[in-house]
Structure formats: C-alpha cells, structure tokens
Image: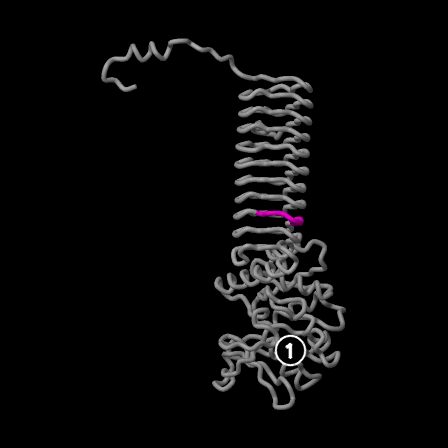
Amino acid sequence: MVYFPVKRALESGADPVVVVVGHQGDEVEAALRSALPGAPLRFARQAEQLGTAHAVLAAKASLRGHHGAIIILSGDTPLLTAHTLEAVVSARTAPGSLAFATMNLENPQGYGRVVHSPGKGPALIVEEKDATAEERQIKEVNAGLYVADADFLWSTLSRVDAKNAQREFYLTDLVALAADGPGAVAVRVSPVEASGVNNQEDLSLAIRALTRRIASSLMEAGVTLEDPERFDADEGVTVGPGTLIEPSVRLRGTTRVGSGCVIGQGCILVDTVLGDGVHLQPYCHMHRAQVGSHCIVGPFARLRPETRLAEGVRIGNFVELKKTSMGKRSKANHLTYLGDATVGADVNVGCGTITCNYDGERKHPTRIGDGVFVGSDAILVAPISIGKGAYVAAGSTLTESVPAGALALGRSRQVNKNGWARKRAAGKSPGKGH
C-alpha cells in the first residue's frame, strides 16, 4: 500500500524520499526497495508511536542539510494521484508558507476538522477527540498531505506539545502555527484520493478503486474489457490497443501485452510479456514467461519462469513448460510437460510427452532439433538430444540421444497370444465373477 504514495512522491521529483517505519519496518523497507530499485529512498525508524508530528521528526536526521520544500504524505493513501500532489505543492503563496490538503466528507467521524478564520483562511485543525460539539459538525477535514518549508517545519515541530486528549504530538498543529506566521493555504482534494485505509473493508474498496482507474486508462487507450468490474491489473502493466480481455483476468507485476491480443477468461499473467496477436484460451497461468507474436496458448496451460515461445507457437490444454524455449511454429497441443528443454522450429510434440529433467539432485537439459516429430506418450530422459528431422515413435522411452533424420523406438516388444482370452473365459467356474 505504501508503494503508491512513495511512487507519487518520486514522480513529483522528490529526492530523497524518506519513509518513516515502525512495526515490521525491515519488511517494509525490503518490499519498497524491491518494488522501486534504484530509487532515492531512505528509511527512518520511529521506535515509539507518539503521534504524527513525532513521526515526521523521526525523518529529520535523514534530511539534514536539505533546504526548501518538504512534502509530507500518509502511507495509507494509495489512491493519491500525481495531479493532486502537484496541486498542493504549487498552492503555497510564499516560500515559507504551508499548504495542506482538505476534503469534504458527509460522515467526517474520526478525522480532524478544519476551522477557518472569517476572511483569513484556515486557522487550525482540531482532532475529533479534542473538538467541541460545534466543531464536530464541520465537514471539511484534514486529508493528511502537507507541503512546508524545511526551516519552518523543523523549527515549528520543536514547539509542538502533547497537551491533548490523546497525549500525542499532532502534525496538525502546524496549521495553527503557520496561520500565526507565514500563512497556511488549504487545498480541497477528492475524498476518493485522500481517504486513508484503516481496516480490511477500506483496503478492499481502495484496491477496487485503483483497479477500476487502471481499467479506465486501458479502455481509453483502445483496450476492450468485456467486464471492467471483473478485471484486475497492477499499476505497472501495459496493454496494446485492439486487445480484447475477457472477464476474471489478472495482470500482475510488469506484465506487457501487445496489440491485437485476446486474453481468455480466468487467465493470470505475472511479469509476463506477450507479443502482438497472441491468443490465450481461458484459464492459462503464466509467470515470467515470454510469448512471441501470433502464438495460441491454452486452455488450461501453465508457463513457468524462463519459458520463451517464438512466433506462431501453439501450446494446448494441460501443457506445462518450465525454463523451456520453443522455436517458430512448434507445437505441443495437449497433456505434456517440457522442463529445461530447448525445442527448435516446426517441431511436433505429441500428447503425453514428458522430459525427465530431474534426477533427484540436479536438473538436466533436453535439446530437440528443427523439424522433429515426437510421437504421443514419449518419455525423454535427460540429458538427451534429438537431431534435426528425427522421429520418435509413440510410446517410446529414450535414454540415449537420437541422430538427425533417424527413427527412435524405445518400446518393449509386443507379444500377442492368440485365443488366450477365450480359453481363460472357458476355464472359469459357473457363478464366479468375470
């Protein structure tokens, strides 16, 4: 959740971005560094949670030597947009003044109320537990976003005390102190963007709103979503125009989808790349895979990490690929497992074929040359190579490599005993089961 306001701060040009952490701070830091590699992030620890002003003071050492504007964001506002952030940043009337965001709520319970002086703008923010009955009727509330001059911020926070109902150091006291000094400006923002996440229901609503925003941007770019309410995508996902996405599809991480694709119902793509004109039949699962243009995959196919399909490959139902590359126009149409395999162009892999790539200790490769035909129910025991244009007979178990152009048979010899079944039936006693 904190990724989103941090990302917005980075997009605004903030450098560095200091994240104040407390409980499970190491996990928060690891997650953000992984999601935003190379970003100018710093982390400050608030050992005791003594209020919002105390949290900001925890970041002071990380910003030593910084002069100019400091943006203060809440970590539980994932729907904040860069446009809104820029509006608050640009609202300050003087370098030393304070700008902060407010919103109007029909039910403002739990939020600090914004009190204005007639003709003078905002005078103070009163937290609900400290508010009078009259102040609690105010619907304009604090949205938790501030922009302040560094010198003003640090000098003012040193004057904040905890003489309030919660015995905490309130960041909202900045408004009253600024109103008596350089001035404060209130910027009205959308409640959808600024409302915080305080429980599981808030979290689910925020996720849905964010996903709907992503869906809208995709549709504006020419993507067809059959049911935007049953579509999930992460912020980093891109989809080309002319692509059709059926219901209950999930696009995760850094997934990139080309133009003119069809993604069938129930597909889940994680950090996966699709070329143009790809058709995914329903209920495919792909993780860190690359699919070339005009491939047809599924239904119910699984592409695991480091799988690469060249142009025009066909992967059918209940086929699983792991760390496998398939050359142009090759196909494995059903009930197949290929792991640690390199497959050439124009190869047919028959139904029920598997590569035995793991000996209990190590993984071993299988190499299949261009134009190879692998018959149904073949077992390829790695390490093994099958040369260009070779044939593998159906039902074969191969433990040795196959030369180019050869036919490989690895079956046990079939024996037919004529009349055996008839003699067996004749020899049974009456009344016994068959």
Magenta residues span 256-263
Q: Which type of secondary structure does the marked residue at label 1 adopt?
A: strand
Question: Which is more toward the observer, 32 or 259?
Answer: 259
Instruction: Report the side of 434 relative to 352 (left or right).
Output: left
Does residue 343 sit above or below 246 in this rendering? Answer: above
- Residue 33 x/y as whole percent: 66, 55
Question: Which is more toward the observer, 419 or 249?
Answer: 419
Q: Is 36 contained in the magenta span?
A: no
Residue drawn at x 69%, y 20% is: 404
* Picture quarter with the N terminus: bottom right
Does residue 11 sit above or below 290 in this rendering? Answer: below
Q: Which residue is mark 1?
A: 187
Q: Is residue 34 visible?
A: no
Q: Report the amino acid beneath label 1.
A: Val
Residue drawn at x 64%, y 90% is: 119
Residue drawn at x 49%, y 13% is: 414
Q: Quadrant of residue 62?
A: bottom right
- Residue 306 x/y as whole percent: 64, 39
